[in-house]
Amino acid sequence: MAKGYRGGGFGGMGGMGGGMRQTDLMKQAQKMQADMLKMQEELENRVYSATSGGGMVTAEVSGKRELMKLSIDPEAVDPEDVEMLQDLIVAAVNTALRDAEKASSDSMARLTGGLNLGF
């Protein structure tokens, strides 16, 4: 046996030390999980809207990142320039999706105190 070794674990720390008890940690983790599930449900039920082309195209997506509605002003429909309309649609949908993702990230950061837990 090494000189000065007393055995018995962690030098008097008593396992967890003077911190939170394991049951308190479990309760806190369960509350955080319940809060996360509630927040996720709320985010999934939200609708995010974005426009492009000065309001010529409007896209609405759900918090589940699904396209729910697409509105196109008839003036945006030019048979000679279909590519422009396609670009306006893509821009509106992508902006709405980014807004939904940002809202989700911001809510998660508030819930976790800025800790990156991989969500």
Image: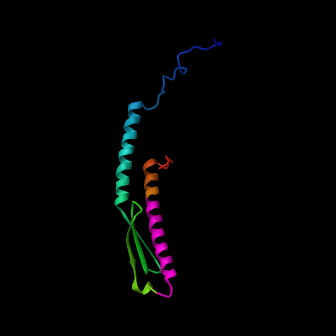
Q: Position of residue 96 (x, y in %)?
A: 44, 68
Q: Is residue 114 above or below residue 75?
A: above
Q: Residue at x 46, y 73 (%)?
A: 92
User: Which residues are drawn in magenta?
Assistant: 79-103
Q: Main secondary structure of the magenta part?
A: helix
Q: Given the current orientation, which residue lies at the most extreme right position?
A: 3
Q: Residue at x 47, y 28 (%)?
A: 18
Q: Residue at x 39, y 39 (%)?
A: 28
Question: Could you say where residue 73 lies in the image, as x and y percent from the top left?
Answer: 40, 83
Residue at the (34%, 60%) spot, across then down: 45
- Where residue 52 appears, as percent x and y from the top left, is 47, 77
Give whichever of 32, 46 is nearer the camera.
46
Numbered label tally:
0
The image position of residue 62, as x and y in percent, is: 38, 63
Colour pattern of the rendering: rainbow
Whether residue 116 appears in magenta in the rendering, the answer is no
Between 10 and 80, the one nearer to me in the picture? 80
Task: Look at the image and tell me in which quarter the N terminus lies.
Answer: top right
